[in-house]
Amino acid sequence: MRLAAQILKYSRLLIIAALFVGLTLASPVFLTGSNLINVVRQTALLAVLGFAMTLVILVGGIDLSIGSVLALSSCLAASYLKEPSTIVIGTIICLGVASACGFLNGLMVAKIKLPPFIATYGMSWMTRGLALVFMGGNIVYGFPKTFRFLGAGYMLGVPTPIWVMTIAFTVLYVVLHMTKIGRNVYATGANKEAAFLSGVKTDRVVIGLYTMAGFLVGLGALMYISRLNAAEPGIGESFALEAIAATLIGGTPFTGGEGGISRTLTGAFILTLLSNGMNLLGVSSLWQSAVFGSVIIFAIMLERISKKLGND
């Protein structure tokens, strides 16, 4: 039983290895340097948004507003990002608006005691509506090279989004695993009442995590529109579900108190590998959604079985 539990513990790494072998045999293009770099670059945005989702799930929450907040923050900042002289102002607006939305989410969950699903679902509708009103059906496009460097540039031969993902991962990993803040996060997620009685300011932890999640969404917004070279209110509609998928496939459960961004990075990589492989093999997009859904269910089943075997 212990051997089976250990195999299940590392099952996601085994899945990645199996995907590499299978896709290498199925497509001569997969194992080329350009395609592998493209896979990691595509993983970067999903990973950053997945990190945002993971932070709130760690304390038993959820954020369904990720895609809509990304749309609003990018639309409000887009006109400033078009001019080289006001890129800094646009960046501050994007990050600030997204962080403020995250703060409001945390406030509704921690202080008003709304269920996270309801609070963030309402925020999703509100921010999407504001983005539509603000843009009035228009699209902002044609960003300068200075800004496009964030999503489409290279630094030391490595795509900039990969650097952004790496920096975000490093900072979050240090905070979550090497500081008192991280200990308070996991304590709050494991048992909020016990954490509160032991002196942890649980409401402050929850609000702080939602705010940080919002900041990461703003960062993801900057990465996405600089790569897309356009901003419009319809972007990001599926991002919340994709971030949830990356988190769950990585092995962070909805119950909170366990898991983390390392697992989410693995989950994002698995999703991107699947998407890349199916595109290379010409699989219909209609089938791709079904495959992703099956993988999510399979990952949750693996997690449940792993816990059961670990407790035996």
Image (cartoon, rainbow, N blue to C red):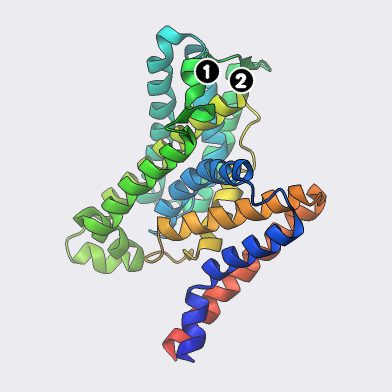
Relative horizontal placement of residue 88, taking residue 128 as reference (left or right): left
Q: Residue at x 45, y 89 (%)?
A: 2
In this view of the protein, which residue sits in the foreground, 9 or 128?
9
Relative to 55, residue 220 above or below: above
Q: Residue at x 36, y 41 (%)?
A: 167
Residue 124 is marked as none
Helix, strand or loop under label 1: helix
Few, some or many residues within 10 Å of mark 2 (<14, 14–19, 20+)? few
Relative horizontal placement of residue 245, taking residue 188 as reference (left or right): right
Q: Which residue is mark 2?
A: 133
Whether residue 65 is visible here, answered yes or no, is: no
Q: Which residue is mark 1?
A: 78
Relative to 156, residue 63 above or below: below
Whether residue 246 is visible here, answered yes or no, is: yes
Q: Residue at x 61, y 50 (%)?
A: 272
Residue 126 coordinates in the image, percent (x, y): 55, 33
Looking at the picture, which amino acid does disc 1 mark? Answer: Ala
Q: Residue at x 52, y 41 (%)?
A: 45
Q: Count up the numbered dots.
A: 2
Residue 240 coordinates in the image, percent (x, y): 57, 46
Quadrant of res 226: top right
Residue at the left extreme, as displayed: 199
Does label 2 or label 1 sit earlier along the sequence?
1
- Per the model, the C-alpha gap separating discs 2 and 1 is 15 Å
Helix, strand or loop under label 2: helix
Quadrant for the C terminus in the image: bottom left
Relative horizontal placement of residue 221, taking residue 171 as reference (left or right): right
